[in-house]
Amino acid sequence: MSHDHDHDNELDPFAARVRALETILTQKGLIDPAAIDVIVDTYETKIGPRNGARVVAKAWRDPAYADWLKRDATAAIGSLSYTGRQGEHMQAVFNTQDTHNLVVCTLCSCYPWSVLGLPPVWYKAPPYRSRAVIDPRGVLEEFGLTLPADKKIRVWDSTAELRYLVVPMRPEGTEGWSEERLAELVSRDAMIGTGLAQRPGIEGQPA
């Protein structure tokens, strides 16, 4: 959804505070809105989730790379030139038939910008940060993800020293696909754990 800049009351409280701060800093000549837009676009469309999706796709296609990603995610991700702020110390956690992984930062909003881009508002919100630990199954259901009762959910708490990337399970029916095509099935939410990889040929449908 988009809103008129003159109607901050239509924004959620966090976004309204950001908008107010941006307005004040702009009026004082301390920031250039155009420069901010470039930074946001860089993280959303260039540095953003596309990087993480390529990491996941490579792990799906290349068992040796997947093993490296498990052992040393920082180095494996860095080998693809995906490095930078809040991506210095990474750990990859792999979903399996028995276990689903979910990432949260209970203290603030630690998040791997270099592979997932800007963190979504809900990731930084207190309700998600507290409830993801207390009731992860219920939180996932609110995201539209209902897991089998016998599937274990493991919650990983990000810190300033260590951030996580969830590697979702590869959807069936993607044998022989290129990394580029596979990456299209991987969403930001799937790499946080609030979603699954998309099934081939069914837009928006998790595997």
Image: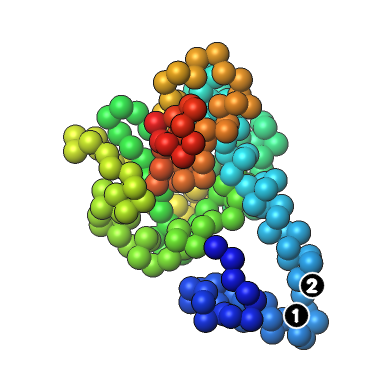
Residue 7 in the image: state x and y as whole percent.
Answer: 58, 80
Between residue 92 and residue 89, name the one nearer to us. 92
> For the view shown, which residue lies furthest in the left direction?
149
Q: Which mark is residue 26?
A: 1
Residue 125 in the image: state x and y as whole percent.
Answer: 43, 66
Between residue 178 and residue 81, name the one nearer to us. 178
Badge 2 density bin: few <14, some 14–19, many ≥20, Cα 10 Å = few
Say which label, 2 or 1, has the lower sequence index.
1
Between residue 37 and residue 107, name the one nearer to us. 37
Asked if residue 164 can be seen in this view, the reply is no
- Quadrant housing the C terminus: top left
Q: Which residue is mark 2?
A: 32
Above-or-below relation of 30 to 191: below
Above-or-below relation of 91 to 23: above
Q: Amino acid at mark 2?
A: Asp
Residue 4 in the image: state x and y as whole percent.
Answer: 63, 74
Badge 1 density bin: few <14, some 14–19, many ≥20, Cα 10 Å = few
- Quadrant housing the N terminus: bottom right
